[in-house]
Image (tube, rainbow, N blue to C red):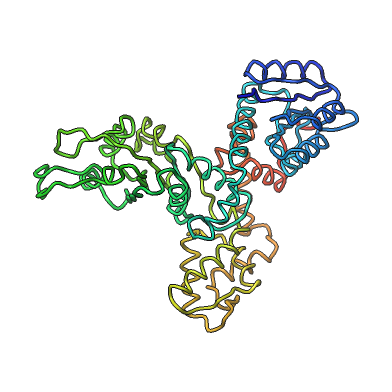
Amino acid sequence: MNTPLVYVVDDDVDVLDLVALRLAQAGWEVRRFSDPAQALKAIESESPALVVTDLHMPGIDGHTLLKRARELDSKTSVIMMSGAGTIEAAVAAMKDGAFDFLVKPVDFSHLAELAQRAMEFNELKRENVTLRKEVAHMRKSGLAPAGSSEAMRKVMELAGAVAATDTTVLITGESGVGKERLADFIQANSQRKNGPHIKVNCGALSGSLLESELFGHEKGAFTGATDRRIGRFEQAQNGTIFLDEIGEMSMEAQTRLLRVLQQRELQRVGGAATINLNIRVVCATNKDLKAEVAAGKFREDLYYRVNVFPLRLPPLRERRADIPALSLDLLRTIRLRLDRGPADISQAALDAMAVYDWPGNIRELENVLQRCAILCRSDTLDVADLPTEITQAQAAASMPSAPGTLETAREDSERRRILEALDECNWNMSLAAQRLAISRSTLYVKLDQYRIQRPGAGK
C-alpha cells in the first residue's frame, strides 16, 4: 500500500519545516512548498491525500489553494492554518470545503490527529465510490432514512462503509431519530444479510428477565423456568443482534454482556455448557453513555467494547433540509397503510414543518402526518391541516426577537454555553464541537452568528 502524500504550504520557512517534520514523523510522505504557486502547479500534476496550508500568503492565498485542490480532486483534504484566526476566516474555509481550521501557533499533536482523521475519511471515500447509488437504492426500498442533507449523507457514507465489516456499531441519537432503521440498513448491506437479524429492546426488560431473554436459560434455572429457553444471542448465530436502548441495562446484565463481547461465547442462565457465537453486534441508545459511565451507571470497559464504530444520527432540527423529503416519504407510506389521506403536501405546509423543531423527531413527524391523513379532506395537505404547535412555531419564527423574549434568552444561554465550552477546551474547535455535540461546521456558523471571537484574535 502506498504511503499517503501530504503537501505542506507556508511562506514562513520555520513553520513550514516544523509542520513538515511532525507529519513526516507520523509516517507520511511529505513535500514542502514555501511558494504557493509551485504547490498549486504540483497539485495539478498529482493528487496529494492531504494539503496543510497557511491562509495568508503572498500571491496565492490559502483559500485559492483550497478551492483549486478541491476542484482538481474532491478526495484531497485540506487543513487550513492562520496566525490571525478570525471566526470569519474559519467559517469561510469550512464553507469552501476545508477539513479543519487551526490557529497558530499550531498544536502539533492535534495536527497529527487531524491529519490521521483526514486520511481515514479519504479512505472511506475511496472505498465507497458507488455508495451513494447504493444508498439511493436502499432509500427507495425503504431500508434507509430518507433525506439528502450533508449531515445525513455523512452518516450514510459511514454506515455503508462499516456495514461490510463485522465491526461492532454504536448508534446514538435522540428518541425517534430512526436508530432502528439505520440498524436495518447496516444489516441489509452486510455480509450477514441472509442471516437472522434479532432485535432486543433492553429498556422493555429488566433484571433476570433481560438476562434470560439475551442469554437463554436451562430448565429449572429459576422459579418458573419449566423449559429450556434459547436466548436472543443464540438465535442470532451467523447473523446480527441489535441491542436497542443498551443504556437501560442493569449492571449485572452489563457484566454478562461484556463477557460475551470479549469472548464471543456464553453460558445459558443455570447452565454449564459453553456456546460459541458467530454474530455481529449493533447497539443503540438515546443516552450519553460517557455521562452514564461517569455517574457509575454504565461499565467503562463495556462502553469501549460497544463504542468501536460510533454513528450519531442527528435530530431533525439539525437537518431541516431533510424534512420535506421525509414528510413526503412518510405520507406515502401512511396513505398506503390507511388507504386514505392526501397524496401531496403543499409547499407552504412543508415550509411550516421545516421551521418546527420536532422534539420527538421522525416518530413525532410520522404521528402528525398520520393524524393529518385521517382528518384531511383534500388531496393536498396544507398549512390549515397542521397542528397548532407547528403553525405557532412558524408565526414565532417570522417575528423579530426583542429584548426580554424567550428567544433572546435562549440565544443568550446558547452563546454562554458555547463560550464555556471553548474556554474548557482552550479554544480547540474540534474538542469544543464534540463537547457541545455539534459538528465543527455548525460550531463555526454559531460563532459567526453570535459574533464570538477568541480574545486577542486578529491583533
In this rendering, position of residue 31 left or right of residue 350: right
Residue with the most extreme right position: 59
Q: Nearer the viewer, residue 204 or 282?
A: 282
Residue 56 appears left or right of 85: right
Picture quarter with the N terminus: top right
- Residue at x 64%, y 15% (from the top left corner): 25
Find residue 144 and report its horizontal and vertical position in percent: 50, 55
Q: Name above or below for residue 174 compared with residue 308.
A: below
Q: Position of residue 270 (x, y in %)?
A: 14, 38
Q: Nearer the viewer, residue 236 or 261?
A: 236
Q: Position of residue 335 (x, y in %)?
A: 48, 74
Quarter containing the C terminus = top right
Residue drawn at the location 49% of the way across and 60% of the way down: 142
Q: Nearer the viewer, residue 303 or 359?
A: 303
**Number of numbered callouts drawn:** 0
Say if 339 sits above or below 267 in the image: below
Question: Residue 126, relative to residue 11: is it above or below?
Answer: below
Horizontal side, residue 240 vs residue 324: left or right: left
Q: Judge by depth and name the residue closer to the eye, 349 or 378.
A: 378
| Horizontal and vertical percent position of residue 160 | 52, 45
